[in-house]
Image: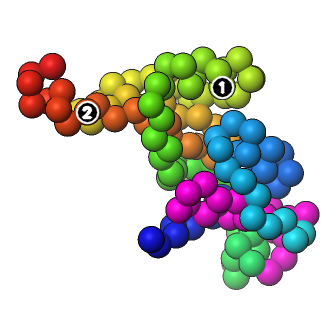
Amino acid sequence: MATVSVRYIVHDVDAAIAFYCRHLGFHEVMHPAPAFAMLARGDLRLVLSAPGSGPGGGQSMPDGTIPVPGGWNRFSIEVSDIAATVEALRAAGTHFRNEIVTGIDGKQVLLDDPSGNPVELFEPILAEAHLDGT
């Protein structure tokens, strides 16, 4: 199976490692420098880079623009009980951008990592439920 990589720019690589490993089930693959780390969760590889950290994903653009964390692009992690997951993460002091919302395919909420990068937590609505009208 193919591995998908996502790069996030983060203010503090160590804080991001702790957040993703402690709260979202990632494990550290490598952390060869203070400004770079690679984590994994199943087939998802999360590459973390500090802004302006020299060559690589956090380097400045030719016009001098430095990459910054945040924005709205995100990856989604499927959970089986979104309410319980959100409750546990809130108890751990994490920050959410919104409350749980129900869409056409499931329930979702946006969790911020320590640098403000969003992670979508998603609980799908089972296809069988749509077939019987519930």
Looking at the image, residue 47 lies above or below residue 104:
below
Residue corresponding to mark 1: 89
Residue 52, label in figure:
none
Label 1 or label 2, whichever lies nearer to me, is: 2
Looking at the image, residue 48 lies above or below residue 25:
below
> Which quarter shows the N terminus?
bottom left
Q: How is the image coloured?
A: rainbow
Q: Is residue 99 left or right of residue 88?
A: left
Residue in the image at 70% along x and 73% along y = 57
- Badge 1: few (under 14), some or many (20 or more) residues near its Cα, within 10 Å? some
**Image-quadrant location for residue 101:** top left
**Residue 51 visible, this orientation:** no
Residue corresponding to mark 2: 126
**Residue 61 visible, this orientation:** yes
State the SS at label 2: loop
Q: Is residue 4 left or right of residue 112?
A: left
